[in-house]
Image: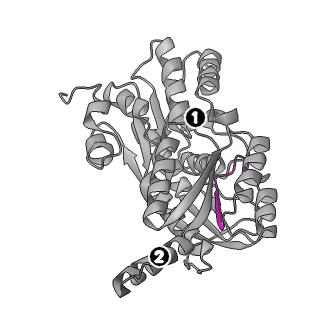
Amino acid sequence: MRIALSGAALVALFASSLAKAETVKIGFVLSTMQEERYQKDKKYFEDAAKKLGAEVVFASADNSERTQAQKVENVLSKGVKALVIQPVNSDAAAKLVNDARAAKVPVIAYDRIINKADLDYYVTQDSCEVGRLQAEAAAKAMNGKGNVVILSGQAGHSVAQEITRCNLEVLKKFPGLKVVVQKSHEGWSGSLAQATTENALSKYKNDVQAILANNSGMANGAVQAVEGQKLGGKVFIAGADADLTSIRNIIAGKQSFEVFKAIQPLAEKAAEIAVKAAKGEVVTSEFKVNNGLKDVTSFNTAVFAVDKSNFEDIVVKTGFHSKESVFGGSTKR
């Protein structure tokens, strides 16, 4: 028995088949999911990709170069047409780009540059501005005098290098400011940052006036160390990412400053570019970043200073954190 389809039904069937044919797979490989913010990166990226009709193959590398290499190989085996990578190590990840390009898959570096690789695109935040904002706020709070500890992220990370570089660039303008400790931390570990801070406080007999941390987790480690010496609220502490714990610490007066890196536009832009690249489209930008091999077409998203005076406008009213979560289940201040 044959069933005759109406013209409208045939059009609908054709449109449905076309939509399925146009659906593309894109890969998204983060270096880790251990930080609170990366739950948001994943969600925003996947939501944006879905709206654009793409399917996401996601993986996380647990801050391991070896694991990331394995995950990238697995993602490529799934038939993705574009790959977004947040490298565990900006130098080591060049091989991952080479592997993807050999499979004719365009690569977008996410959040951190991949050095000396034939990258197609780079989507990032202004990491230097993060470092500048932290150091300028510290210099102002310290009246340009005192000892500073810098807690850098994992060695080899372009973001950690850039934040720290711009911390130092600002601090050197103030002769009265002295960086007494600057140390990198494996996996951006908060517990290792706490140990570094404790050692610095011990070595300098608590004569530390400011601590600049490359991210929120390490800033919280510094808060724990400072609280242990009963110096809570007496040492300027800055972080970056605006994790919930850091915002609560700012409200409680335990932390002074945070830099909010707007994750949603970062993730959405990366998804947009990945989908276009997967379809063979070219995306242009006047902003370029040299990765040691080429000038990579790049896209920057904004960062914002956060302290006790403006945290509600920056992280609550924008929906990054709910008022209930910030105030521990109560909306009363």
Seen from the viewer's position, the closer of residues 133 and 270 is: 270
Query: Which amino acid type is marked by label 2?
Result: Met
Seen from the viewer's position, the closer of residues 97 and 184 is: 97
The picture places residue 168, in percent across and down from the top left corner, at 60, 46
Query: Which amino acid type is marked by label 1?
Result: Gln
The residue at the point 76 percent across, 69 percent down is 118
- Give the mark, 1 or 2, whose residue is nearer the N terminus: 2
Residue 148: say if magenta.
Answer: no
Question: Which circle marks residue 34 in the picture?
Answer: 1
The answer to which image quadrant residue 22 occupies is bottom right
Q: Residue farthest to the bottom?
A: 7
User: Which range of residues does the magenta coloring cover?
Assistant: 81-90
Seen from the viewer's position, the closer of residues 289 and 332 is: 332
Kindly tell me whether residue 161 is visible in this rendering: yes
Q: For label 2, count other residues whose C-alpha is less than 10 Å away and answer few (under 14), some (14-19) or many (20+).
A: few
Q: Is residue 324 above or below residue 203?
A: below
The picture places residue 313, in percent across and down from the top left corner, at 26, 47
Question: Which circle marks residue 1 in the picture?
Answer: 2
User: In the displayed structure, does residue 202 sit left or right of residue 104?
Assistant: left
Does dot 1 land on a helix, a strand or a loop? loop
Label the magenta part by its dominant secondary structure: loop
The residue at the point 66 percent across, 68 percent down is 81
Question: Which circle marks residue 311 in the picture?
Answer: none
The residue at the point 59 percent across, 81 percent down is 282
Q: Is residue 49 above or below residue 193?
A: below
Q: Is residue 184 above or below residue 204?
A: below
Is label 1 or label 2 in front? Answer: 2
The picture places residue 288, in percent across and down from the top left corner, at 61, 72
Q: Quadrant of the C terminus?
A: top left
Seen from the viewer's position, the closer of residues 123 and 281 is: 281
Compute the Cα span from label 1 to label 2.
58 Å
Residue 88: say if magenta.
Answer: yes
